[in-house]
Each structure stands twice: as C-alpha cells, then as structure tokens.
Image (cartoon, rainbow, N blue to C red):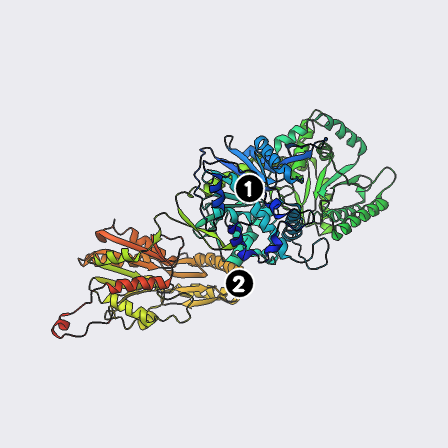
Amino acid sequence: MMSRSYTNLLDLASGNFEALSLGGGGGGGGGARGLRRMSRVMTVPCALADLQEEEERASSVASDVQSSQAQERIIIVANQLPVRARRRQDGRGWSFSWDEDSLLLQLKDGLPEDMEVLYVGSLQVDVEVHEQDDVAQTLLDRFKCVPAFLPPDLYDRFYHGFCKRRLWQLFHYMLPFSASSSSRGGRFDRSLWEAYVLANKLFSDKVIEVINPEDDYVWIHDYHLMALPTFLRRRFNRLRMGFFLHVPFPSSEIYRTLPFREEILKALLNCDLIGFHTFDYARHFLSCCSRMLGIEYQSKRGYIGLDYFGRTIGIKILPVGIHMSQLQSMLHLPDKEWRVNELRQQFDGKTVLLGVDDMDLFKGINLKLLAFEHLLKLHPKWQGRAVLVQIANPARAQGKDLKEIQDEIEESCQRINATFGHEGYSPVVLIERPMSAVEKIAYYTIAECVIVTAVRDGMNLTPYEYIVCRQGAFDSNDSVANDPNKSMLVVSEFIGCSPSLSGAIRVNPWNIETTGEAMNEAISLSDGEKQLRHEKHYRYVKTHDVAYWSRSFMQDLERTCKDHFRRSSWGVGLGFGFRVVAMDPNFRKLDAEQIVSAYTNSKSRAILLDYDGTLVPQTSINKKPNPEVLRIINALCEDKKNVVFIVSGRGRQSLNDWFSPCEKLGIASEHGYFIRWTQHEGWETHSQAMDFSWMQIAEPVMKLYTESTDGSAIETKESALVWHHRDAEPGFGSAQAKEMLDHLESVLTNEPVTVKSGKFIVEVKPQGVSKGLVAEKILSSMAAKGRPADFVLCIGDDRSDEDMFEGIAGVVAKDMVASNALMFGCTVGQKPSKARYYLDDTNSVLHTLSALADASEPFFSLEETIEPAPSPQI
C-alpha cells in the first residue's frame, strides 16, 4: 500500500489514484513488484521496524533520527546514476563501470577530499525483480550508488511521458497546441503528472533509506526531480538541500501555461539553494515566483535570495564547465594524431567550419545550413574554399516534427552541394553516426570556427570543448606547434554558454542573413584578432571548469544553510502547499496567561498598538473600529497605570474621528509625525518648522508613473506621499516601483526626506519619522514624569512596526524604562520579525487585549469618589 504521507501529499496534486498504480498488466509488474525495495542500508542505530513506522507517519515533518557520523557527506540525486551497466555475455549477472562522461561523476573534483559522496538514481537498463536486491547491494558496495528501480510502465510515463513530452518541451518554449501532435504527445495529461509525482516519491524513499539528516547534504539535479524537495523537506525540516536546473527555465508567459505550475514552484522553494546556468533563467524563475506566489527577491552583498516563510532561499547563477583534465588527457591519446593528419589531408587548402549537435528540434541545424548557403551566395570567394562539417549525433527521440527536420536538413545539404559543389569539393559534409570522442577531438582540432545555432539550449559545452582542443592542437609537437593559438566562435544568443563567451560572435539564429555574415566575419578576421579572442576564452574555460562549478555551488549551499540548526522550524500545509516556517529560537507565541500575570504585577504600563492588520483585518473593506475594539481600548485607557497609544500610518483626521469615544487614548498618526496624548490635548508635530515644498517635486514624479502604470494610485497625507501599486500588473508594478525609487532618490537628494519602498508601496516622508522613534518618545516622556514603564506591549503586523520592535529592544540600555521592565514585542502572523512574540491574527490580538482589559483597574477621579457613579462596563 502507499504510505499515508504520500496519500496526503497527493490530496492537492491528484485525485485519480488508480492512475498511480504500479500494476496494470502488460508486463509492468504488480503492485508488490513495484514497491519491492532493497534492504534498507542501516546508517543509524535503530530498528528497521521503527524506521518503517516513522516513514508511515503522515504527520512527520522533522526527523528524530540521531546522526551517527561526524564526517560530512553529500547525497547526489539524479534521474540516472553515473554508472554503465551491461549484462554479462553468459547471461549470468551484470557488469558495471563508471560513466566517465557523466557530470555527476566529474563534479566530485570540486568537493572536499574528505567528503563522502553517495549517488541515488536509476539505471539505464531494466533489471529483473529477482535480481534487484543483488544489483543494489553490488552498486552500494562498489560504487556507493543506491539504485531506484522504477517499473517499466511507470518509468515510461514518468520519463518519456511527463519529463520529455511535457517539461522538456515546455522549458524549451514548445506548447502542446495540437491534441494530435505525435511528437509533442497531445495536450497535458493528469495521469502523466501523477506518474511524475509517484516516481519522485520512489526516489525520495531511496534517499530516506540512507540519509543522516543532520550530517548530510542533498544535491538534486535537473527537471526530472523537481517534486522531490517537498517529499524530503516534509520528513526533515533542517535538511541541507540544493537543486540545479540544467535546462532553460522559460519566461513566466510560457511557464504559467503548465497546469501544475504552482506545485512545482513550491516544491523547488523547499530547497535551500536553487542553481541556474544564466541570469535569464534565474530571472524567469524569480518572475514566476513573483507573479504566481507573490514572493519578491532581494539582493544583498552580491547574493540573490527569496524570503519564504522565514527561510532565505539562495539563487545561484553559474554555468557548468567541462572536465579539463579528462579532455586534456584525451588530447594525448595515440590515435588522435593520425586522425588529425588524415583530416588535414582531406581538407587541405580548405577553411573548415564545424557544427556538433544532437539531432533534435532545438539545435537549429537547418538554420545553420541556410546561413552557410547565404555565405556562399554573397561571398563567392569562399566557394571552393569553405567547408561546413556538420556532425549530427543520432536522435534520442522520434516523432513527426523531428522527421520533418531531418528531411529538411538532408534536402538543404543536397541543394547546397549541387549548387556550389564540384568534383573534389563538397561544401557541406553531413555526418550522421555515433562518433568516438577521439574522432570528435580531431575535428575540433582542424576547424577554424565552430558554429552553434541552437534556438534554445540549457548550456551547450561544445564551444568549451573546441577551445580546449584548439589550445591542445598548438601545444602539441605537430607542424603547427609554433603558430599562435587561435580559434573563432559563432554562437546563438539563446544558449546558456553564450554570456560567458564575450569574444564570440553572437547571433540570432532565426536571422539567416546576419548569421551568414557572422560566419564570414569569423573566418575573415586576422590571426591576431583570433588569437586574442582565443586566449580570452581559454582563460575563462580553464578557470571555470566543472570542479570550480561544483565547489562554488557547495560553498553557497553551506553559506545558505549555516543557520539551519540555530533557528526553530516547523512544517505547515498539505500536499505541495507544504513548507517549513523558520524562526529565531526565542520567537514564540504570546501566552495569554503569561502576559496577564506580568500585566497585573506591573505598576506603570505602555501599550502601543498598530491599527490596520492589528486591530482590524487588512482585508476588511470597512476600516472603522467596531464596538468591541472601542470597548477594549476604553477599558485599557481607564486603568490609571496604563498609557495606551494607537501608532499608525493613517492620517490624524480619520483616527481622531474613529476613536473619538476614547478620551484618554493617545494617537500617533502618519508613523508619528503627529502625536496627541489624549483627546483633550492638542497635536504635536515632529518639527514645527517643517518645509513641505519637496511635495511639489515628488508629486509630479509620482503622477508620471501613475499615468503609465494601470492600477496604481497616489495617497496624499499631510506629511507624506505614498504610491500604491497593489492592483497593478505584478511584474510591471514592481519594475515601476524600483524605477520610481531611483527617480525620487535622485530628485530629492538635497531634501530632508526619506524615500522607502514597502509591500506594494513607495513612500516619501520627512527624515527622522518612524514608529521606532515614536516608541522611544512615549517611553522617555513617561520616565521624565517619574513613572518609567515596567511593562511594555507593542503589537503590529507590517514592516513599519519592525522599527517599533527594534526601538523597544534598546530602551533598557537608554534608561527609558524601569530596570526590571518586561518587554513584549509582538507581530501578527507567523513570519520573520524583530519581535520576540507573535499572535496568529487580529482575533487573537483582540482576545489577548480583552484579557488585559478584564484584568485592568478602573480609574476613579476625586469627583467620582464623592459623587458615586456606576462603574464603567468592562
């Protein structure tokens, strides 16, 4: 049976559990076969039954497994293990070897030498059920690999169905417009999503079998396992976990067509660090988080982070590199030299342009051929001299669209060769067969220029390999050893490596003419220019290899996770809505009994309350205080030991009108620019000689942005101007707010004002005005009158209230309160805050204040003592 935790997770992810069955005939195996697992690898001292029981707990959100290791270890999880498997010739058993070309194996070079590496993934071959336990034990013992055996039917729906026909195509900007499109697999199918989730669950089972949650790092790779972080985070709150996406992340306009868009975003946000090859890919991801989840990123000291329920999720931008030592060793293989000499004889007197691509829809091979044809037409001098060698690695997929591309490529090759070729000269040489690495290196060595015209590609390491091979060609002992090192690149602007190759000629591959002209420019440049560009590229490729990439990622992962075991955390939410809320260990819910006890035992109290979001809900249309709020405030004000203030950003007129029944209530409006101690006292201002001429400068700027930003508005206060963009298009509103912030700061440089951005606002207000200063002013005034506060309660819900929490934290050192004062800074909602306490919502706030009001002592004046009157209703 499925684990209950998995069933809960699918409450939001699916509703068709039959589609998730591992059985179903047709050779797919029964349910028992699908859930058969290898013997659990015991890494901690406990009973197997205890671990299985823990796995079945639906409420499990944190591991109580104690670590038995002091050594750090990393578990690398990917769809496929870096291991090659083949059945022995006698049919008895399997033979395994490392896949030296696997990035997962190569990245070990950048990890600390004393760090143990464990791999979790699937094999590229089908292993019979009765062999799985033996194979798993062999891989663990010899290779430190833990295989996840997925039933063939599930793997087909997971990998070929959802991964390849959905995610891979969508991430490469292909949408399933036609329901009958054979290569695109028709429209979105929920059963394929359910297979994807189930496969990710089975991968998580394997990770859980071997993990030491307090010691291990987990590094997840690529789009096949984007649901995995939720399964792992659900079990281990403090697990240190990173993810790297090796394909493009599409723009939000494309990504939001995915029916399960929010589920995948929320799953990725359960990681601590998310990596991308380029800033464009990261920017698209951040835009999706902003538009669909309302989460904005911040950049601090060069690092980009997302604040997600108290956890800071790092965003890493770094393209992967090549394995330098492996490639350089291949340059000295014995059969490399004779292959190079053979090719030089074949293309003697010719200028070779080289393309090395997989045969798929996105490599733009035919666009490259058309551009080369344009080169030969417009620059006849290259006819008979220039040769385009196109190596097309065999297609790994099938379909109608791919067949059309292949036919088009063959037709273009035949046409170009027929038009411009002659005996002994073929302008285009198309190689459609598997090619050994040494043979490919030989082609790199003799090529004057490499052309990459992919219309969309996550990274593409072909240019890096070419640069290293060209360096090796001139470092060898052959006939060109004394020539300067030189190479040239023409690369598509739509591939991941393009930004790092500043000396390459970047092209839009869809523009045939400019691509053809770029080819001509590349092979026509002087040797000196080619040498300079080559040297620049080689320095980058040599220093930014795969070891540098993995080392940098691990350093950022360690930095992001450094506070994991210092902060309190707990899991909330169901299904893919699950997330971990992380708080300071001293942050806790305000206990009603505790604060009532402190309240009754105190002699001088200060109670400072925000209004919107604290006494009335932010979502409330009617912002006026209800009778219950007025009753509670009046009861608190009637206690002679209390000084009660409403500290709000609202204007003084509205607050004065709403709280007119509360005669003894103090009000600080517009963040403290205006202060009134009681209804019978006049308003004090922050500065008597304040000059508001700056409004004449700021308001026209705000109007300019309001006119060009639909859904925005200006709020004019007596002392401040506020631009709201809550109802504007999220991405555009945020961009306009950032632009306005810079604009206002520029034009108001010499004015005595502060320009600040908040949640959907940009505000300009006088300098030195904040709720924190208001709190200090109230408390210092109480101390000056000989009654320093020994009980301080501040409650608020937004960023401006953080100034108040920060202000009361330092008043003890400034002698503004009694030495034994009890300080209660309390935010509304469970979120990161400088306050030490929280209350869930406005109802909890009113319940707590009502308890304090019930414990208050009514104030009686001398006249009331002589002329007895009914006690106030509390």
Q: Quadrant of residue 83?
A: top right
Q: In this rendering, is residue 663 above or below 117?
A: below
Distance from the alpha carbon under mark 1 to that under mark 2: 43 Å
Side of 694 relative to 252 (left or right): left
Count of numbered tags: 2
The residue identified by callout 2 is 729
Within 10 Å of disc 1 (Cα), the crowding (few <14, some 14-19, many 20+) is: many
Closer to viewer: mark 1 or mark 2: 1
**The furthest residue to the right:** 423
The residue identified by callout 1 is 206
Q: Secondary structure at mark 1?
A: helix
Label whose residue precedes the other's in the sequence (1 or 2): 1
Q: In this rendering, is residue 795 above or below 351?
A: below
The x and y percentages for residue 263 are 55, 55
Within 10 Å of disc 2 (Cα), the crowding (few <14, some 14-19, many 20+) is: some
Side of 15 relative to 572 (left or right): right
Q: In this rendering, is residue 578 above or below 860?
A: above
Side of 183 relative to 857 (left or right): right
Disc 1 to disc 2: CB gap under 8 Å? no
The x and y percentages for residue 22 are 62, 49
Asked whether residue 317 is in view, the answer is no
Give the amino acid at mark 2.
Glu
Q: Secondary structure at mark 2?
A: loop
The x and y percentages for residue 445 are 71, 33
Give the amino acid at mark 1.
Lys
Quarter of the rendering occupied by the C terminus: bottom left
Q: Quadrant of residue 108?
A: top right
The x and y percentages for residue 77 are 56, 41
Q: Quadrant of residue 439?
A: top right
Asked whether residue 116 is in view, the answer is yes
Q: Residue at x 69, y 34 (%)?
A: 87
